[in-house]
Image (spheres, grey):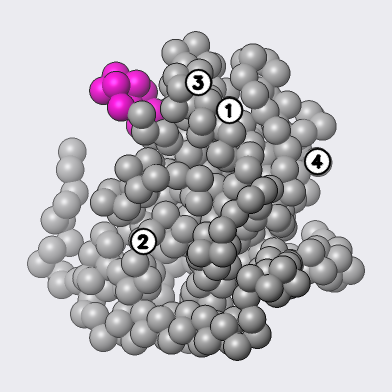
Amino acid sequence: MNIDREALTEMYRQMLTIRRFEEAIEDVYRRGLMPGLAHLYIGEEAVAVGACAALEPRDYITSTHRGHGHCIAKGCRLNEMMAEVMGRVDGYCRGKGGSMHIADFEAGMLGASGIVGGMIGVAAGAALSIKLRGTDQVTVCFFGDGASNQGVLYETMNMAALWKTPLIYVCENNQFGEYSPWKDVTASERIASLADHFHIPGVVVDGMDVLAVLEATQTAVERARKGDGPSIIEAVTYRYRGHHVGDVKPDYRTEEELEDWKKRDTIQRLRDQMMKDNVLSEEEAVALEQEVQRQVDESVEFGKSSPLPSVEEVTDHVYA
């Protein structure tokens, strides 16, 4: 692919920001500064960044319980994200959504859900709304290998294919649905092969290569904008951390397997390639990394300084 220096640098910055933000989340969680559970995106950064790099600000995405990376790649602000994770009023949802339910409609981030596959239907509705309104937007629906066996995926995929809605399904196959290897619970050889049943394109890409994800998404976006309907991208990736912080079942994978995947680390991979191609110098990389860390540190302080919601607003924003 022929990508300019600015775009490459931005993708590197975003992937690094996601990783440093998630490392900060882990620290915040272990210090008791956030409620609920923390599901980290570390290792999967290339999928969110590569996919969102193919989108315009006007496009939509839906996310998952492991969605901080999607938020950052789509342009959500770190301060409001961290405040939300900490349950504070300056968060995107006034602290009432928490880590698994961040949304920013202005950025085109339509929300995340702690329910496996919970946003697949929302993505289908957003894509249908685009078709009905006659705009050239697209919707990217992120979901994991665990959600690939949810009925809502099959139902909406059938509808999207029939109505040719601009919906791009991006499956982040990080090898495990909670503690179960995906191949133990999925009969098909590849999740992307679902496309065959609905006569739409389906591709498998290296989810540890941000450029491979970008290229596949660009192809799907071009098809969707032309009115040719949905596509499936299965990005084969790996989460370095457990299902959540404090994962108590380390026996479902080996240390050797983890280390093998880390040798293909997406951030180091892009950094090395950019330096090899004289796109990024060591000095520039260090300066960029320091700036990213400063921004993440500021988000933590912002979250800590934000007040908790008052008891009086416990029923605000609740609708029946």
**Can residue 156 be seen here?**
no
Circle 2: element type = loop
Give the camera-side residue of 7 and 74.
7
Looking at the image, can residue 233 be seen? yes
In the image, taking residue 33 as reference, residue 238 lies left or right, namely right
173 left or right of 164 in image: right
Query: N-terminal of the two: label 4 or label 2?
Result: 2
Q: Amino acid under label 3?
A: Gly
Write the start and end of the magenta stretch as one range. 126-135
- Which residue carries the number 1 mark? 231
Direction from residue 36 to residue 263 in the image, left or right:
right
* Residue at image mark 3: 229
Query: Circle 2: is it few (<14), some (14-19), or many (20+) Cα within 10 Å?
Result: many
Indicate the secondary structure of the residue bearing disc 1: strand
Q: Position of residue 236 (x, y in %)?
A: 73, 48
Query: In the rendered image, which residue does mark 4 sit on?
Result: 183
Looking at marks 1 and 2 on the same chain, the residue that comes earlier in the sequence is marked by: 2
Q: Earlier in the sequence, mark 4 or mark 1?
A: 4
